[in-house]
Amino acid sequence: MRFVFGLIKWVFIGLFLSVAAGLILPQGFAFLDRLGKKERAAYLFDAKVYGGSGEDLSTATFPADFYSNRLFVYGEMHGVAGPQTVDLGLANHLNAKIGLRWFLSELGPATAMAFNHYLATGDDQWARQAFEGWADGDAQWANQEFFAKLGRLRAANLTKTPESRLYFLGVDQIQNEILASALPGALPAPTGPQETIARRVNEALLRATNDRKADYRYRDVLENIDIVLLDPDLQSEPFYGFWGLSHVLEVTVNETGKPLAVLLSENPAFGEKIVSMLSVFGPGSTMLWPARILPQPLQGKNGEPYTVLPMGNDNPYMGYLPGIRDLELAAGDDAVAIFHMDRPGSPYDDGKRLVNTNGIMANMTRFDINGNVSETVDYIVYFNATPALTPWRGDAFDFARRERS
């Protein structure tokens, strides 16, 4: 019996030490990460090309060769509000600087048609159907900030000539079968020049996607982009895309996986004329998650379809990005700061600082990026304490607020 009691005692001691290590070690790693942040932030001060709200980028000081690229891709973490503002800010900035007119979008072609119809006419019934479809699946895209952004884009388009307005090209897989079946037959004939081109191309994309029936998402995306590039009105046009984080990385992930940006760099139409930008979130940022994919303790007791979690990249348990405190220091009081990371003399060329995230979420997703930060992305878009998105419908259980109280 003495042996049994002794064994139980050591088992409990082992469990206690494991729990203690799990609580203390992440905090220790986060503390050590702060060492040397002033020296690294000095590089970031020089690398900073924008600081402000993210809505108006007219004061941005991108280098001249930034504007010579043909494809601009901006990666977000779905569920956070701040990138919605920067997305529109970047599109309007590029429209003013280089005449950008086309979103190469993470949307199905029918969804793009619904959005374009709203932009052209102000009739939002089909755009709302797209959001209803996302909400049916508790998708993070079903949020009020996204829809409000479409309204601001329509208002901005009305200040431009018909030839210079921005429209969506939906190169992703079909996301809404109701829209895919109803459109374009339910839409009136387009009138403006850009709307006419967009309708023609999106109809071709819809037919091709329906006929292809691909079981590999990137097959649809890549072949749809080829269709766009072959269109006679688009062969010399620049494009801009707002995509999920993993799609815009310029190096392989998990040893052999090629993100979309890598695959598109192999297309002669783009080659090295791709610039990638990536969102990073500072302390106090929160994120909207579908509750159904989270463990029970993170779900609300009233069956809320979404949960708001504390998901700044400074969270040592959920997800900690080494170097986040460097960005915080260099950003100062700016709500949004953009840093040019692909510059000489970088203190980040050795190691994975500002690349791989540590923590529970990182372990769950197994997301190992094979490169340093300057190889992985051209620009980092840093957000100070940006809030979570607001669900299109239904409630969100605010776990983040409960943790703060």
Image (tube, grey):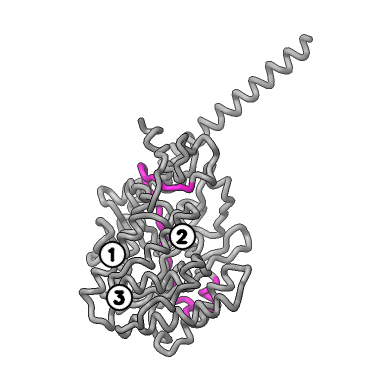
Q: Looking at the picture, how far across and down is residue 107, in whole percent?
A: 46, 68
Q: Amino acid at mark 1?
A: Gly
Q: Looking at the picture, how far across and down is residue 40, in whole percent?
A: 38, 51
Determine whether the residue tagged by mark 3 lies in a helix, strand or loop: helix
1 relative position to 293: left or right: right
The reply to whether callout 2 and callout 3 are in contact (CB within 8 Å) is no
Q: Measured along the vertical axis of the image, is residue 12 above or below residue 75?
A: above
Mark 2 vs mark 1, CA separation in Å: 19 Å
Q: At 47% across and 79% down in the image, what residue appears?
A: 270
Q: Measured along the vertical axis of the image, is residue 357 above or below residue 70?
A: above
Give the quadrant of the N terminus: top right
Q: Is residue 337 part of the magenta span, yes or no?
A: no
Q: Looking at the picture, how far across and down is residue 340, in whole percent?
A: 36, 62
Residue at the farthest left position: 159
> According to the image, label 3 marks what residue?
120
257 relative position to 243: left or right: right
Q: Amino acid at mark 3?
A: Ala
Residue 133 numbered mark, or none: 2
Q: Which residues are magenta?
A: 263-290
Q: Answer few, some or many: residues within 10 Å of disc 1's Cα (few below 14, many 20 plus, some between 14 and 19).
A: some
Q: Earlier in the sequence, mark 2 or mark 3?
A: 3
Can residue 368 be seen by looking at this rendering? Answer: yes
Q: Answer few, some or many: residues within 10 Å of disc 2's Cα (few below 14, many 20 plus, some between 14 and 19).
A: some
Nearer to me, 207 or 402: 207
Determine whether the residue tagged by mark 1 lies in a helix, strand or loop: helix
Q: At 71% across and 17% down in the image, what residue appears?
A: 8
Q: Looking at the picture, how far across and down is residue 171, in whole percent?
A: 48, 73
Give the quadrant of the C terminus: top left
Q: Earlier in the sequence, mark 3 or mark 1?
A: 3
